[in-house]
Image: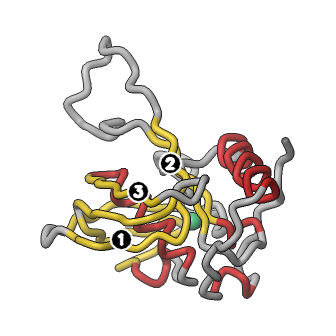
């Protein structure tokens, strides 16, 4: 496995609509494994192929559902992280309810933004073997899915943010993807 360099703005690949994946070969499996390793190393909760200079409809996501819940009990066991590989994804359903949250992006270091997202979504995609999957996500997981699918369409969180700012040193870290 290998770590892949993450590209930053203003690289134009981040603005391009990525092409659908058509070949589910060994090369793709290696690419996916390398993307997972790169995401974990960053560290990030998601990584889309354009962020590693590959204009294909492919993203990896790893996050523990409920990680953001405020009522979390400190003594509760850590929630297991869930890993998703989504290929040629399409959002098929969105909740009317939208929520604000603070986002960052591995490709836009040093900026935070307040972004409104659908609270829940449904996604149709292919898994790493090319089999169709349907996924439901809510809360932060839904936010991450929307952020990654945006990347595959050349859209960045700064396009959707109601405000962006350079975080101060004492500002809380945000999840990066
Ligand atoms: Ni991002």
Checking the image for residue 133, the label placed there is 3
**Nearest the camera: 23 or 146?**
23
Answer with the quadrant where ligand 1 appears in the image. Answer: bottom right
Checking the image for residue 127, the label placed there is none
Judge: label 1 CB < 8 Å from ligand 1. no
Q: Taking 3 as reference, is 46 left or right?
A: left
**Which residue is painted at 63% across and 81% down in the image?**
18
Label 1 element class: strand
Alpha carbon of mark 2 to alpha carbon of mark 3: how far? 11 Å
Where 4 falls versus 153 (above or below)? above
**Which residue is painted at 32% across and 40% down in the image?**
68
**Which residue is painted at 75% across and 59% down in the image?**
25
Q: Which residue is mark 2?
A: 84
Label 1 or label 3, whichever comes before in sequence order: 1
Where 32 falls versus 7 (above or below)? above
Label 1 Cα crowd, 10 Å radius (few <14 / some 14-19 / many 20+): many
Farthest residue, direction right: 2
Image x and y of residue 72, in percent? 25, 27
Image x and y of residue 76, in percent? 30, 15
Q: Which residue is mark 1?
A: 115
Label 2 or label 1, whichever comes before in sequence order: 2
Label 2 element class: strand
Residue 92 found in image quarter: bottom left
Where 77 falls versus 158 (above or below)? above
**Nearest the camera: 37 or 41?**
37
Q: Taking 69 as reference, is 64 left or right?
A: right
Alpha carbon of mark 2 to alpha carbon of mark 1: how far? 23 Å
């Amino acid at each position: 496995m290998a770590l892949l360099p993450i590209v930053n703005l203003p690289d134009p690949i981040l603005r391009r609509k990525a092409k659908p994946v058509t070949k589910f070969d060994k090369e793709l499996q290696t690419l996916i494994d390398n993307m997972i390793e790169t995401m974990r190393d960053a560290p990030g909760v998601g990584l889309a192929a354009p962020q590693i200079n590959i204009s294909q409809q492919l993203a990896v996501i790893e996050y523990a559902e409920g990680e953001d819940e405020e009522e979390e009990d400190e003594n509760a066991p850590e929630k297991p992280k869930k890993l998703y590989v989504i290929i040629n994804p399409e959002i098929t359903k969105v909740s009317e309810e939208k929520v604000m949250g603070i986002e960052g992006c591995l490709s836009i270091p040093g900026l935070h933004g307040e972004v409104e997202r659908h609270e829940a979504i449904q996604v149709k995609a292919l898994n790493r073997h090319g089999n169709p999957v349907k996924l439901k996500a809510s809360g932060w997981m839904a936010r991450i899915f929307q952020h990654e699918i945006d990347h595959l369409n050349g859209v960045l969180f700064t396009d959707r943010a109601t405000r962006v700012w350079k975080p101060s040193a004492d500002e809380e870290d945000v999840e990066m993807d």
